[in-house]
Image (cartoon, rainbow, N blue to C red):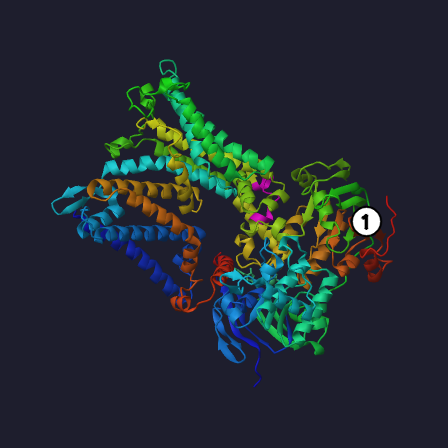
């Protein structure tokens, strides 16, 4: 199928879905009755999803604008033209479907490698996203996911490589390494929880400290000269970077669960299935159990939770430990895949996948099931970025800019929800004609927001 | 034709299909105090929020001085000189009084705020209307009464001439209420037009010129205060007669349930205890009331009994068991029910649904969970039962978010939850704050019923009528100490007042 046709098709589908919703809603409003659509619309989850989708679309549109602007700006060295910009836009939207370049331009279709890689990259992101989301639900900001992720990486690799598979069956080694990683992450997460509970130290500060403590501990462990685990370093690695062996070196790797047959040639493995199962479990725990009820009560009103006899200190510690364990599980699954190698030196930045848990959780409005989709989406952008790099003169960082925009927009999701509700009418004329002082705007907005939030709920 | 200061004509506003305001009209004359009366959830706050631009009416028009105006937000309201003191204040805690007053309309010079001019203007205003405030204090360190005056000054500073007061007296002490009513009179005399929401009919009779009554979102009527009576107003409001005096039998005290000995609670300031060497007992089948002016240690006393605040020395026994150092969970399990003073801070998780709030202390009970999995249906059924019994009104019933319920109905939800715990000791702090007269009558009956069931009740109230009406024994607190024990049948409000102000004491401790 020629590229532009594929592209058009996507647009028509999305546009018609939107048009249907809008028209159906307007009609129902006029006739003053509640339709299936209106009832669904009233649900918080639906509003949340729509506002996230709106941030995504806005982010993508801005990304496309950047591509076009880069193509238009004349430059001697660049080989960009409007034609390449068009290619770029197609790839930004649907790079995973790219199957190469034919005579008439880019060709699209099902691309197993891209799809599989997307799922593979999504695996740790789902878990770090869950990590951040669970903490958020309890009213805590887990910015320590990178440290928890690193701690787990080290423990997972050490256990997976150092336990001889000649003695212990590989499956057990896998399990031990996986649980060990989770435990390491949980400990790394519990520390800020303990500090918060007993010494009232803000978790953000301790989390950041734990991140760098983790970074330095890992450096010591795998130091080329003096590290206790330097025997796990691959001697064939490049000179200045120390690579730890892949776990396959010890015959330990996550089962493929047959996914390699569907997505031939990709890195995908059973990890994604485990991640999804964990997300569902977390959803059930938060939504259906008394334990989840306690955590949420602490998160939304600590004083009331205390008043009801819920031990908020314990809740804080457990919630941070779970958050850490989830980030740890992300690292364990990533490295136990067997096809990723770990290289580390402290002056490198902390693992991005830990920080990326924050936008993933934000985009999913902290809903554990939503995290599956938002993480997959962020990794889809990554894959699209790689396609952009391979197929056009653009580089892959454009998609990082797009993710950044999407994250910015998702911070506005409350605003989108109000626009969707119709409780804010965008009134351009009055916005531009009034020259009131900036503070008035801000103060009133805040008031309005509070009020409108109340209306919308 | 008369030109009204504000007319709201045929206003309708629905929330998810349910009308909170159904074709309501209200006309505010210039310079009058116009009261708005109605049961909890009748739609008073909603109507006023529409006038202040927080909500948009679905239909209906608003006129100012005879001209149709459109109010899209608080900014527009400000433009039309409409100001509002909300039921729950909207002040920035970490700003000073001055900063709060000028926030949003600062005069600036080269980008710098000109505090001096503002200060002078505010000083003049506060002298004119008798609004005492300490301009340099942070809001978090001020009393509720002062916060209220700050809210009023905020309106005056913006030269508003339509002033909306949403239940301003619910949080004030009797003395402060008197002051506020005086201030309102002054404001009206100087030409401001005032809309005044309150559940206390005596206040309406004292200051208002006219009163509009709403019931269940509908307009019932407007009457001249000079031509009406208390019972007529209540009947218009609830549709039946209401008893103001609680009927109760003689109390028959039984075993001691709560035994407080030499209790000391440290104060915010190092050298002064907020509760100082307090001892008393509460027995089965009696209602003991702690009376006192707000801020004399009643809150801290309650928090230390319920486990929310640490005890410095002394002991607390519940049914003979020492709970001085027990955690809140243990205390709840042993049978303490607590209707807290601050419903938003302690009483409710505002972002939970009503049903989840109703099981806040019960969700771990056998009948609501199995293997830690919540039984939704059971909770729903239980919530519906309480909603029915206690007449908790909300548009979506058990699934309504606590946040969007009317203030009085939030309070009813808390009371329902605590009374249904069937506690050995019910601690009720200002239980009827913000409730309409019908609801107050009902809640008072419930509290008396608890007593007659042989439970112990500890009541903390600033409302002297409530204190005199409900209690079997009165303990007066002054500056952290119990300065007197009185029998409500043998004392008068006046004498009580003397004790409360510290002018008189009788210490016959160790009953
Ligand atoms: N933001 C909102 N969203 C949904 N429903 C709302 C909202 N605000 C108010 N309501 C509903 O509208 C009705 C009227 O509420 P309102 O707050 O106006 O009552 P009120 O007369 O001020 O009562 P009270 O005396 O208890 O303060 C109530 O049933 C309430 O639950
Ligand atoms: Mg109200």
Instruction: Tell me where residue B346 appears, x and y as whole percent.
Output: 63, 48
Query: What residue is pinned by disc 1?
Result: B482
The image quadrant where one finds ligand 1 is: bottom right
Residue B173 drawn above or below residue A101: below
Q: Is residue A59 left or right of residue B511?
A: left
The image quarter containing residue A274 is: top left
- Please indicate whether residue A387 sits to the left or right of residue A153 in the image: left
| Chain under disc 1 | B
Dot 1: element: strand
Q: Is residue B387 above or below residue A429?
A: above
Q: Is B150 covered by the magenta stretch?
A: no
Q: Residue A385: which quarter of the image?
A: top left
Q: Between B27 and B497, which is closer to the camera in this rendering?
A: B497
Determine whether B343 is above or below A197 in the image.
below
Residue A350: x %, y % from top left: 40, 34
Taking the view exactly as shown, the residue that stands out farthest to the left is A103
| In-image side of A7 versus A381 (left or right) | left
Relative depth, front residue between A137 and B139: B139
Q: From what the image shows, is residue A186 above or below residue B98?
A: above
The residue at 20%/50% (across/down) is A75
Q: Residues within 10 Å of mark 1 (few under 14, many from 20)?
A: many
Residue B210 appears in the picture as rendered: no
Res B60 visible: yes
Farthest residue, direction front: B110
Q: Residue furthest bottom?
A: B1
Q: Nearer the viewer, residue A63 or A176?
A: A63
Rendered location of residue B294, percent (x, y): 73, 55
Read off the magenta span: B356-368
């Amino acid at each position: 199928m020629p590229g532009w046709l594929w592209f058009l098709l996507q647009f028509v589908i999305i546009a018609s879905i939107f048009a249907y919703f809008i028209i159906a809603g307007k009609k129902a409003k006029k006739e003053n009755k509640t339709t299936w659509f209106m009832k669904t619309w009233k649900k918080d989850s639906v509003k949340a999803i729509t506002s996230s989708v709106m941030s995504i679309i806005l982010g993508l549109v801005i990304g496309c604008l950047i591509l076009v602007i880069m193509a238009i700006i004349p430059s001697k060295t660049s080989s960009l033209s409007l034609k390449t910009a068009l290619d770029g836009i197609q790839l930004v939207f649907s790079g995973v479907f790219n199957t190469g370049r034919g005579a008439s331009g880019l060709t699209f279709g099902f691309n197993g490698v891209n799809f599989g890689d997307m799922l593979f990259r999504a695996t740790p992101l789902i878990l770090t996203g869950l990590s951040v989301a669970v903490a958020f639900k309890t009213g805590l900001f887990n910015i320590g996911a990178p440290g928890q992720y690193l701690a787990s990486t080290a423990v997972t690799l050490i256990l997976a490589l150092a336990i001889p598979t000649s003695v212990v069956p590989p499956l057990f080694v896998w399990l031990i390494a996986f649980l060990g990683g989770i435990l390491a992450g949980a400990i790394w997460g519990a520390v800020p929880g303990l500090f918060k509970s007993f010494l009232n130290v803000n978790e953000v500060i301790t989390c950041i400290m734990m991140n760098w403590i983790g970074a330095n501990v890992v450096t010591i462990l795998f130091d080329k000269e003096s590290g206790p685990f330097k025997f796990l370093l691959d001697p064939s690695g490049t000179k200045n970077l120390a690579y730890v062996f892949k776990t396959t070196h010890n015959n330990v790797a996550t089962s493929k669960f047959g996914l390699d047959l569907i997505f031939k040639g990709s890195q995908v493995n059973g990890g994604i299935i485990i991640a999804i199962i964990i997300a569902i479990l977390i959803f059930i725990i938060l939504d259906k159990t008394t334990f989840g009820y306690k955590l949420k009560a602490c998160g939304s009103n600590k004083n009331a939770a205390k008043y009801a006899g819920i031990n908020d200190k314990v809740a804080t510690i457990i919630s941070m430990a779970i958050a850490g364990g989830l980030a740890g599980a992300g690292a364990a699954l990533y490295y136990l895949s067997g096809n990723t190698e770990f290289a580390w030196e402290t002056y490198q930045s902390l693992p991005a996948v830990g920080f990326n848990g924050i936008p993933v959780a934000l985009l999913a409005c902290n809903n554990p099931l939503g995290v599956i989709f938002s993480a997959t989406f962020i990794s889809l952008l990554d894959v699209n970025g790689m396609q952009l790099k391979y197929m056009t003169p653009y580089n892959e960082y454009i998609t990082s800019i797009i993710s950044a925009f999407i994250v910015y927009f998702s911070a506005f999701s409350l605003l989108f929800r109000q626009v969707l509700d119709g409780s804010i009418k965008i009134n351009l004329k009055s916005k531009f004609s009034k020259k009131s002082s900036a503070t008035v705007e801000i103060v009133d907005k805040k008031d309005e927001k509070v009020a409108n939030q109340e209306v919308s709920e | 034709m008369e030109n009204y200061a504000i007319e709201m004509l045929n206003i309708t506003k629905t929330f998810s299909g349910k009308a909170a305001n159904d074709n309501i009209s209200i006309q505010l004359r210039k310079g009058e105090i116009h009261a708005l009366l109605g049961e909890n959830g009748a739609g008073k706050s909603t109507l006023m929020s529409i006038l202040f631009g927080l909500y948009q009416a679905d239909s209906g028009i608003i006129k100012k001085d005879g001209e149709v105006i459109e109010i899209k937000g608080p900014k527009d309201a400000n433009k039309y000189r409409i100001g509002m003191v909300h039921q729950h204040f909207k002040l920035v805690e970490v700003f000073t009084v001055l900063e709060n007053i000028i926030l949003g309309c600062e005069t600036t010079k080269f980008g710098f705020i000109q505090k001096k001019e503002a200060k002078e203007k505010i000083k003049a205003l506060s002298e004119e209307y008798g609004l005492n405030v300490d301009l340099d204090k942070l809001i978090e360190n001020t009393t509720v009464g002062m916060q209220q005056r700050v809210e009023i000054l905020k309106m005056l500073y913006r030269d508003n001439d339509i002033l909306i007061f949403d239940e301003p007296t619910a949080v004030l002490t009797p003395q402060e209420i008197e002051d506020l009513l005086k201030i309102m009179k002054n404001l009206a005399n100087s030409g401001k037009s005032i809309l005044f929401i309150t559940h206390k009919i005596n206040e309406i009779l004292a200051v208002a010129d006219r009163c509009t009554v709403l019931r269940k979102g509908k307009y019932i009527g407007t009457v001249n205060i000079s031509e009406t009576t208390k019972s007529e107003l209540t009947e218009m409001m609830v549709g039946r007669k209401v008893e103001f005096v609680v009927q109760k039998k003689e109390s028959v005290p039984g075993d001691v349930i709560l035994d407080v000995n030499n209790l000391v609670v440290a104060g915010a300031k190092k050298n002064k205890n907020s509760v100082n060497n307090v001892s008393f007992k509460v027995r089965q089948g009696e209602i003991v009331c702690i009376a006192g002016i707000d801020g004399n240690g009643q809150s801290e006393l309650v928090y230390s009994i319920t486990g929310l605040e640490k005890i410095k020395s002394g002991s607390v026994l519940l049914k003979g068991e020492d709970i001085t150092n027990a955690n809140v969970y243990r205390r709840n399990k042993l049978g303490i029910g607590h209707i807290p003073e601050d419903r938003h801070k302690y009483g409710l998780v505002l972002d939970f649904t009503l049903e989840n709030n109703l099981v806040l202390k019960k969700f771990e009970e056998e009948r609501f969970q199995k293997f830690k999995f919540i039984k939704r249906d059971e909770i729903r059924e239980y919530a519906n039962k309480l909603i029915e019994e206690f007449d908790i009104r909300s548009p979506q019933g058990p699934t309504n978010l606590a946040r969007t319920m009317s203030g009085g109905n939030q309070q009813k939800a808390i009371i329902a939850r605590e009374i249904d715990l069937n506690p050995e000791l019910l601690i009720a702090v200002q239980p009827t704050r913000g409730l309409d007269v019908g609801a107050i009558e009902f809640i008072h009956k419930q509290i008396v019923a608890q007593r007659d069931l042989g439970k112990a009740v500890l009541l903390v109230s600033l409302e002297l009528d409530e204190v005199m009406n409900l209690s079997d024994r009165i303990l007066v607190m002054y500056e952290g100490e119990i300065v007197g024990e009185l029998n409500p049948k043998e004392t008068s409000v006046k004498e009580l007042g003397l004790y409360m102000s510290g002018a008189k004491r009788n210490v016959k401790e160790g009953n």
